[in-house]
Amino acid sequence: ADGRLPTNFPGASGGGSGSGSGNGNNARSDTTLANPLLPDDVLQGAVPDVIKKAESFCVFMDKVVVHMRERLTKQTSLNAVESETPTNFTHQFAKATGQEVPVLKHCYSRLNNLMKTLEITNMDAFSPLQDVADFATLVATYDKGFAIVIEPNGSVIPGVYEPTMRLACLDSSLAIKPVFKKFESVVITSGTLSPPELYPKLLNFTPCVSVQIQMTHFRTPICPVVVCSGSDQAQMSTRFEVRDDASVVRNYGALVVELAGTIPDGIVVFFTSYMYMEKIVSEWNELKILDRILERKLVFIETKDIQETHTALKNFRRACDCGKGAVFLSVARGKVAEGIDFKHHYGRCVVLIGVPFQYTLSHVLRARLDFLSTNFQVRDSEFK
């Protein structure tokens, strides 16, 4: 806290939805839909006196951050994974800090009100603090349907391993419940969810109509090919035992070079993780393979920075639109792979370097499977 912080900020006596028109019924409804996991008593409830003052709230948030850091440090020193319920986590927080658990519920709304009062526009700069506030609010709101997983070598970003504390939502019905509450008719469609009879159980609803429509292919796939060896007949594989071999790295690069010189417009290359992509691209640079690709097309790379990736995608499309063509290097199951459609000339060829298998030993995945087994009698094989 500093001299700019007011003694009390707006909404301290009740309501986390802001002021002005935000106090209307429609605004409250929109707020609920924007925060589907937060019940009305949290979004609209009165703020505890202990965090009404801005300085007091900042002190409280500091204690939350310190406690989370200490938990991470402890599990890292033990080199052990801890998976626990929200109730257990909040109990340990109260015991270690002497703070009341119900106060945690209001971290989300208090932080948002404070940032509005200070007229902060650069929200990205406070993203880590917002994550902590969201974590604190959810962990104090729900005693079921969530799990806290603390890993000394976790991975939120594919290929990046570091101490992590994750609040995993196990019960998907919590997120969709406000949608069912507000709208009389809801249409849920998907081309991949299977079997369809499983999802009404997971989302806790009874469908009025359930229809499966046979897909019609307007055209056959164009030349699907599995490449197992390079021009020198050396094996090409991303298996851990051979993925770092010089011949494997060189042959993957040679394949992209040949494709870039033959196929027009856009080519998208997916790697199994950020770490593997960065390693391969670095070696391609040393071997001058990137220079050979650049002689044929421009090269753009997905990074962990959202803005950088957005700019790279924009320029990738511009290169394809003007006829120059480009290669986009990305990560399977990453932001680009899951959310961008490389249609028409933007994706004349897709190269998948390695198969991004689901990491079945993931502690978050195991917690979700255990939840499904306990509450819905869903077997692991049925879920997968």
Image (cartoon, helix red, strand yellow):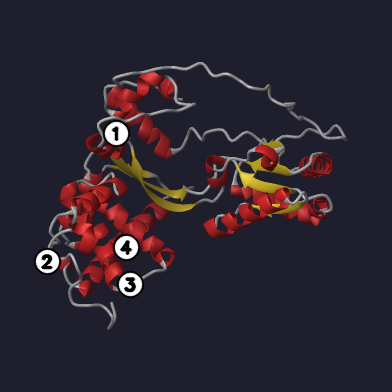
Q: Can residue 173 be seen from the camera position used here?
A: yes
Considering the numbered disc 2 on the image, is that residue within a helix, a strand or a loop?
helix
Marks 1 and 2, how far apart at CA:
33 Å
Q: Position of residue 34 (x, y in %)?
A: 31, 49
Marks 2 and 3, how far apart at CA:
23 Å
- Is label 4 or label 2 in front? 2
Q: Is residue 118 above or below residue 365?
A: below
Q: Is residue 102 left or right of residue 165?
A: left
In the rendered structure, which amino acid carries the disc numbered 4? Answer: Val
- Is label 1 or label 2 in front? 1
Give the number of the disc on residue 69.
none
Counting residues from the N terminus, which is met first, the one under dot 1 or under dot 4? 4
Q: Residue at x 72, y 55 (%)?
A: 282
Q: According to the image, label 4 marks what residue?
A: 65
In the rendered structure, which amino acid carries the disc numbered 1? Answer: Ser
Counting residues from the N terminus, which is met first, the one under dot 1 or under dot 3? 3
Counting residues from the N terminus, which is met first, the one under dot 1 or under dot 2? 2
Mark 2 touches mark 3? (CB < 8 Å): no
Considering the numbered disc 1 on the image, is that residue within a helix, a strand or a loop?
helix
Q: Position of residue 132 (x, y in %)?
A: 33, 58
Marks 1 and 4, how far apart at CA:
29 Å
In the rendered structure, which amino acid carries the disc numbered 2? Answer: Asp
* Front position in the image: 144 or 344: 344
Q: According to the image, label 1 marks what residue?
A: 173
* Front position in the image: 167 or 89: 167
Marks 4 and 2, how far apart at CA:
20 Å
Give the number of the disc on residue 49.
2
Considering the numbered disc 3 on the image, is that residue within a helix, a strand or a loop?
loop
Q: Is residue 6 left or right of residue 314?
A: left
- Is label 2 or label 3 in front? 3
Q: Is residue 317 left or right of residue 183?
A: right
Counting residues from the N terminus, which is met first, the one under dot 3 or under dot 4? 4
